[in-house]
Image (cartoon, grey):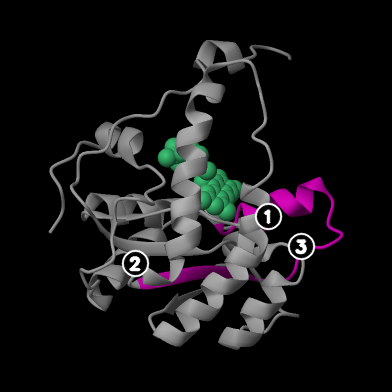
């Protein structure tokens, strides 16, 4: 079942959901596969479609993944927040508190998902990096939009990948580390309520260039 949202409403209300993830409501595999089918319509360089999607439901593996995440996220979240002198400063405490909650509760999400892409981007120049990650991340965002349209939510996270974390996660899940890179770690759950507001962002005019920088 999908929510009654226009495309624009979907685009402005797909948030990083952390405190409103419903840890008690099971997520059927059929729903995840439906979202993935939609996500796989995303573009890939040379039509490579080199992606693999790892869904983790096993409680012990979720706990182990959450521990890997926490080993990196806890020190990161304890760093002082950056001061940017604009609207982002007012949001920072809410983001920090929300991220701290996810850090403490990651394994409680019914499903954790890791999108993987064939090859490894280490040492690649900007063109290769853009082509590499551009062949995975549009599909991940489509997946998040599809979740949202069905009353589920997720949060884009990357902190588990830092240092040895990616390799530890690969060993835990049997991901062939030499041949596939991981794009992130996504907790998935139904959301508590389905009403999500647009975020306050820097205005587009401030970020736009015409005919040159
Ligand atoms: C590349 C990337 C990495 C991120 N990594 C994390 C993360 O490791 N942990 C986390 O809690 N949120 C993470 N986020 C979520 C951001 O904090 C979030 O997108 C931002 O605060 C804006 O909030 P919104 O997504 O609700 O609009 C990440 C987002 C992106 C795009």
Q: Are marks 1 and 3 in contact (CB under 8 Å)?
A: no
Q: Which residue, given by chain and number where applicable, does mark 3 sit on?
A: 121
Cα–Cα gap, marks 2 and 1: 36 Å
136 left or right of 187?
Answer: right
Cα–Cα gap, marks 1 and 3: 26 Å
- Please state the horizontal and vertical placement of residue 61, each as a whole percent of the image: 49, 84
Is ligand 1 within 8 Å of the beta carbon of the residue shown at mark 2? no
Say which label, 3 or 2, has the lower sequence index. 2
Q: Nearer the viewer, mark 2 or mark 1?
A: 1
Say which label, 1 or 3, has the lower sequence index. 1
Q: Nearer the viewer, mark 3 or mark 2?
A: 3
Say which label, 2 or 1, has the lower sequence index. 2
Q: Which residue, given by chain and number where applicable, does mark 2 sit on?
A: 37
Query: Which range of residues does the magenta coloring cover?
Result: 111-136
Which image quarter holds the C terminus? top right
- Whether 46 is drawn above or below 200: the answer is below
213 or 76, which lies in front? 76
Tally the numbered discs.
3
Label 1 secondary element: helix
* Residue 118 within the segment the image draws in magenta: yes
202 or 20, which lies in front? 20
Q: Is residue 38 visible?
A: yes
Label 2 secondary element: helix
- Please state the horizontal and vertical placement of residue 39, each as a whole percent of the image: 39, 59
* Residue 128 within the segment the image draws in magenta: yes
Label 3 secondary element: loop
**Mark drawn on residue 172:** none
Q: Which residue, given by chain and number where applicable, does mark 1 sit on?
A: 75
Label 1: few (<14), some (14–19) or many (≥20) C-alpha neighbours in 10 Å: few
Query: Residue at 75% of width from left, 72% of height from top?
Result: 164
């Amino acid at each position: 079942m999908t929510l009654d949202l226009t495309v624009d409403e979907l685009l402005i209300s797909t948030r990083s959901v952390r405190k409103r993830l419903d840890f008690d409501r099971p997520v059927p595999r059929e729903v995840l596969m439906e979202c993935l089918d939609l996500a796989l319509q995303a573009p890939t360089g040379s039509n490579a479609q080199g992606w693999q999607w790892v869904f983790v439901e096993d409680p012990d593996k979720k706990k182990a993944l959450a521990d890997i995440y926490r080993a990196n996220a806890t020190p990161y979240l304890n760093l002082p927040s950056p001061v940017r002198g604009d609207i982002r400063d007012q949001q920072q405490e809410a983001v920090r508190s929300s991220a701290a909650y996810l850090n403490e509760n990651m394994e409680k999400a019914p499903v954790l998902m890791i999108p993987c892409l064939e090859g490894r981007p280490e040492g690649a120049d900007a063109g290769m990096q853009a082509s590499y990650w551009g062949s995975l991340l549009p599909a991940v965002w489509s997946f998040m939009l599809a979740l949202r349209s069905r009353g589920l939510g997720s949060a884009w996270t990357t902190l588990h990948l830092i240092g040895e974390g990616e390799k530890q996660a690969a060993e835990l899940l049997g991901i062939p580390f030499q041949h596939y890179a991981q794009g992130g770690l996504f907790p998935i759950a139904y959301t508590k309520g389905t009403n999500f507001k647009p975020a306050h962002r820097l205005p587009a005019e401030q970020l736009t260039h015409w005919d040159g920088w």
